[in-house]
Amino acid sequence: YRVRWEILNTADHGVCHNRHRLYVVGILSDREATPFAFPAAVEPLALTDLLEPRCSDDDCSRLPPPAGSSAARVVAAELARWSRDRIDPSAVDRVLDAGVSLGWASRAKPAVPCLTRSRGQGMWCLSRGRFLTLGETARAQGLDHSSVSWPHGRHHGRQLLGNAMSLCVLQRIVCTILRCLDWPCQPLGPWELGTAQRALAAAASGVPGLHAASDLPSAPPPPASPPRTDL
């Protein structure tokens, strides 16, 4: 095998999501027709195009519940910084991780912070005054959530997405591997051509108003297995 490895950021591969992960590729030496190289960076989908359309329920001054929680303090501190800088938070889309203590909080950015399983509520969209919806969280991983079943509700769906590798990066790596194996395929994939980014933007614009309180009902947990009687 010829083995290559590299740390790639999802934000360099079609989606505005700061997610650095290690990728390792091994190809049989006698099957590699052309040398493998990890794909170069492409233009990411802008945060505004990843988010659902604005609606009358958006309120950039809203704080995460419950009042006085660590998340509420993190968002309040960021809003205070924007006020001092004379920036209107409703005018530009920014996202921050409100699931940390105030001392570890980072500034809101025009890209989704790294999703993790522990962020079951998701990331806070400062300009909309709400957590990212499940659909927005899925698109941050390069996935159109309408093509996937989420039987156990929003919280479980966000946990799964926090554990997942980014679809956009995996698709680009797999397409590059196929070209190295001399398989018949297009020289440029959907992320290089921008068609994948446009498809995600179209999916976002087609689902207005699916905010965190109503985007998907929570399903009951699966039934427990009956006790064994043959022990």
Image (cartoon, rainbow, N blue to C red):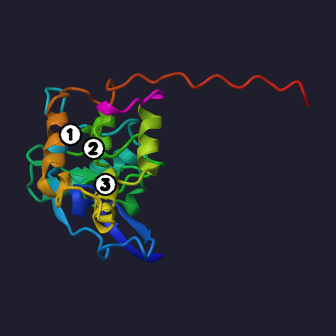
- Asked whether residue 110 is in view, the answer is no
Residue at 21 percent across and 69 percent down: it is 40
Q: Earlier in the sequence, mark 3 or mark 2?
A: 2
Q: Disc 2, disc 1: CB below 8 Å?
A: no
In this rendering, is residue 189 above or below 27? Answer: above
Q: Amino acid at mark 3?
A: Gln
* Secondary structure found at label 3: helix
Disc 2 or disc 1, which is closer to the eye? 2
In front here: 113 or 80? 113
- Residue at label 1? 61
Residue that numbered label 2 is attached to: 139
For residue 60, above or below residue 38: above
Q: CA distance from mark 3 to mark 2?
A: 14 Å
Residue at image point 40% right, 42% down: 68
In the rendered image, the quadrant that contains the C terminus is: top right
How crowded is the residue under tag 1: few (<14 C-alpha within 10 Å), some, or many (20+)? some
Residue extending furthest toward the right = 231
Circle 3 residue: 171
Magenta span of residues: 146-153
Mark linked to residue 99 = none
Of residues 204 and 116, the one drawn nearer to the viewer in this rendering? 204
Q: Earlier in the sequence, mark 1 or mark 3?
A: 1
Residue at 42%, 54% (x, y): give it.
Answer: 100
Point out the tag, 2 or 1, that comes first from the N-terminus. Answer: 1
